[in-house]
Amino acid sequence: MGLGISPPRYELTLAQGQVFTGQITVFSRLPDDQKITVSRVDWLVKPDGSLFSLPAGSSQFSATAWMTVNTDPFVVREGRPFETKFTMQLPETAGLEGSYWTAVAFTTEPRAGTEKGLAARFRTRVLAIVYVTIQGTEQPSAELQGVTVVTDGKDGRRYLVADVANTGNVYLRLNGELRFVNTAGKVARRVKLPERVLLREGLVRYRLALPEDLPEDAILAQIEIQPQGPAKSYGGPPLYGEVSIQ
């Protein structure tokens, strides 16, 4: 919708009591003036990877209370980016450990448009994500809870479904690949997995369509996922699972 931010996220590892100040640049690709309102929000990720926002302070692992940001509205237009700053100040509170997160939301005023022949008004919101991990308390851990092959009742296609649960106290980034092995024990096809974010106490569900042009002798699907914690703190072996596709 023509509105963007840079950087899109901060990933901080701070000690209790430490203060960090960051800068966010808001830019527009639209020629008209865009009036922007600023707010702090919480957010979560659904197992399918979609993000949804929540009221500030409502998430169990919210860092919103530690953030201050100028919430005065401003105007941005093409070629005239706007820079704003935020400050994270960690409290010295007993029991804080692992990762927390929040976001700065930049929202345009509604503007006129059309949708399927009807008059409509559009509002754009972009989030600058901020993760903060309490230094020295990281305990990254994840578990592959199952790998199955299911057939969709609507389109008849087969899908590999794999669930990954976060069993530690920090957020993780998941990368990996899906391999298809033939009757000779050789890898006949490799598919790179899209990166996913796994929040603490969260679940990521991969639902991957099996390629329709797989070799006829492909008999096994193997999924291998490498979690990566804040500041490369995971250090554990990759998560591995396999399932027959015959």
Image (spheres, grey):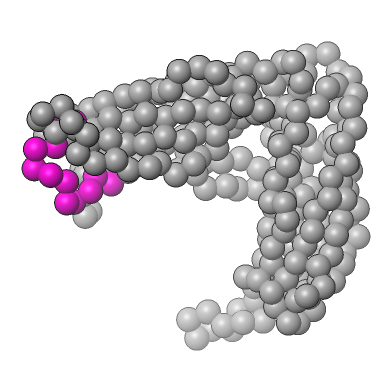
Instruction: Inspect the magenta stretch and tell me whether residue 217 lies in it.
Output: yes
Q: Is residue 58 visible?
A: no
- Residue 239: quadrant of the picture: top left
Instruction: Inspect the magenta stretch and tell me whether residue 164 lies in it.
Output: no
Instruction: Using the image as rendered, state which of residue 116 and residue 98 is in the foreground.
Output: 98
Say whether residue 216 is left or right of residue 226.
left
Compared with 227, 39 (above or below) is below
Name the residue rendered at 65%, 71% in the picture: 2
Compared with 117, 92 (above or below) is above
Name the residue rendered at 81%, 68% in the picture: 81
Instruction: Using the image as rendered, state which of residue 10 and residue 64 is in the foreground.
Output: 10
Say whether residue 37 is left or right of residue 206.
right
In which quadrant of the rendered image does the N terminus lie?
Answer: bottom right
What's drawn in magenta, residue-wise? 209-220
- Residue 105: quadrant of the picture: bottom right
Name the residue rendered at 85%, 21% in the picture: 16
